[in-house]
């Protein structure tokens, strides 16, 4: 079981390292349209952590997100198993 978890994390790390440089820095369709018509959005919440400016920061934030989701799912699974 532990070997499968470690292998899963290695696959995720590899996938992040390969796909992260492919992410576009261009605005999405809604943002582009808002810029064209001159609308500005109000910031109501700022995330405590950003994706980072560099490649390694993006990978680290991706890994942090994967670890948080995995940890939450694992804890929920353990709680369900006890019941």
Image (cartoon, helix red, strand yellow):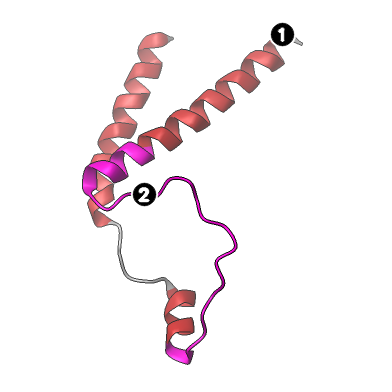
Magenta stretch: includes residue 52: yes
The single residue placed furthest to the bottom in the displayed view is 37
Q: Residue at x 51, y 32 (%)?
A: 69
Q: Provide the residue designation for mark 2.
A: 51
Q: Position of residue 57 (x, y in %)?
A: 28, 43
> Is residue 41 toward the left or the right of residue 81 in the image?
left
Mark 1 element type: helix
Q: Provide the residue designation for mark 1.
A: 82
Q: Who is closer to the viewer here, 50 or 3?
A: 50
Q: Position of residue 82 (x, y in %)?
A: 72, 8
Magenta stretch: includes residue 45: yes
- Image quarter (top left, top right, bottom left or bottom right) of the C terminus: top right
Label 1 – label 2 distance at C-alpha: 36 Å
Which of the two discs, 1 and 2, labels the residue nearer the N terminus? Answer: 2
- Is 80 situated above or below 61? above
Mark 2 element type: loop
Q: Nearer the viewer, mark 1 or mark 2?
A: 2
- Is 39 situated above or below 29? below
Q: Position of residue 7 (x, y in %)?
A: 32, 20
Q: Which residues are magenta?
A: 36-62
- Image quarter (top left, top right, bottom left or bottom right) of the N terminus: top left
């Amino acid at each position: 079981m532990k070997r499968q978890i470690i292998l899963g994390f290695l696959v995720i790390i590899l996938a992040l390292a390969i796909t992260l440089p492919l992410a576009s820095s261009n605005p999405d369709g809604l943002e582009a349209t808002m810029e064209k018509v001159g609308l500005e959005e109000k910031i109501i919440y700022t995330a405590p952590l950003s994706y980072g400016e560099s490649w390694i920061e993006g990978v680290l934030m991706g890994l942090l997100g994967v670890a948080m989701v995995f940890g939450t799912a694992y804890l929920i699974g353990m709680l369900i198993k006890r019941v």
